[in-house]
Image (cartoon, grey):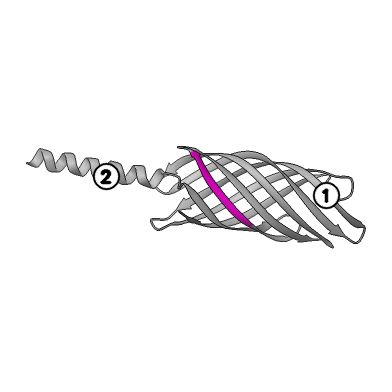
Amino acid sequence: MKKLLVLFTVFTLTAIGANAQAISNNALGLRIGDNDGFGGEISYQRLLSENNRLEFDLGWRDSNNVDAFKLVGLYQWVMNIEGGFNWFVGAGAGLGSYDSPNGDGTFALIAGDIGIEYNFDFPLILSLDMRPELGFNNSYSDDLDLDIALGIRYQF
């Protein structure tokens, strides 16, 4: 009986540890940050495999007399640090439009992503990430921008 109790305890602790490291199937929330001004994004994450996911962010930026909307898609690799802490890296691309005193237009970008997140025991993820973005357009985003943001997402 004692061996059975020890085996059950080890199995339960292993299952709890594995659950804490798992990525949720879906997460929806906000990503609030700074990229030459203040901006916010509606963020959706979708699990692809045990350690991979897609992230889609639709947001706006308000900076230096320029308003911009953009859609960014990223492929991310997620690795467990310990318990509910994970770190992630990713790469992707996006499209957007801008409105400035000098005119309106569209732009494209490629992006990288690196960050850390914490998965709570209840369905919430908090993250902090850095996204370097290289834009392509003569008038608005022909340079490298560093987008740093705080994310809060509901897992389901």
Question: Which residue corresponds to the image point at 30% horizontal and 43% vertical from the top-left?
Answer: 15
Q: CA distance from mark 1 to mark 2?
A: 52 Å
Q: Which residue is mark 2?
A: 13
Q: Is residue 9 left or right of residue 23?
A: left
What residue is at 83 percent from the left and 49 percent from the top? 106
Q: Identify the amino acid type marked 1.
A: Thr
Quadrant of the rendered image containing residue 81 = top left
Q: Is residue 30 left or right of residue 102?
A: left
What is the tally of numbered marks visible in this picture? 2
Is residue 43 located in the magenta-colored stretch of the structure?
Answer: yes
Question: What residue is shown with label 1?
Answer: 106
Q: Which residues are magenta?
A: 42-48
Q: Is 108 included in the stretch rendered in magenta?
A: no
The disc labelled 2 sits on which kind of residue? Leu
Q: Residue at x 12, y 40 (%)?
A: 4
For label 1, the crowd category at 10 Å Cα-Cα, with few meaning under 14, some 14 to 19 and many 20 or more, is some
Magenta residues: mostly which secondary structure? strand
Residue 118 image point, x, y percent: 47, 52
In the shown orientation, is residue 94 left or right of residue 124? Answer: right
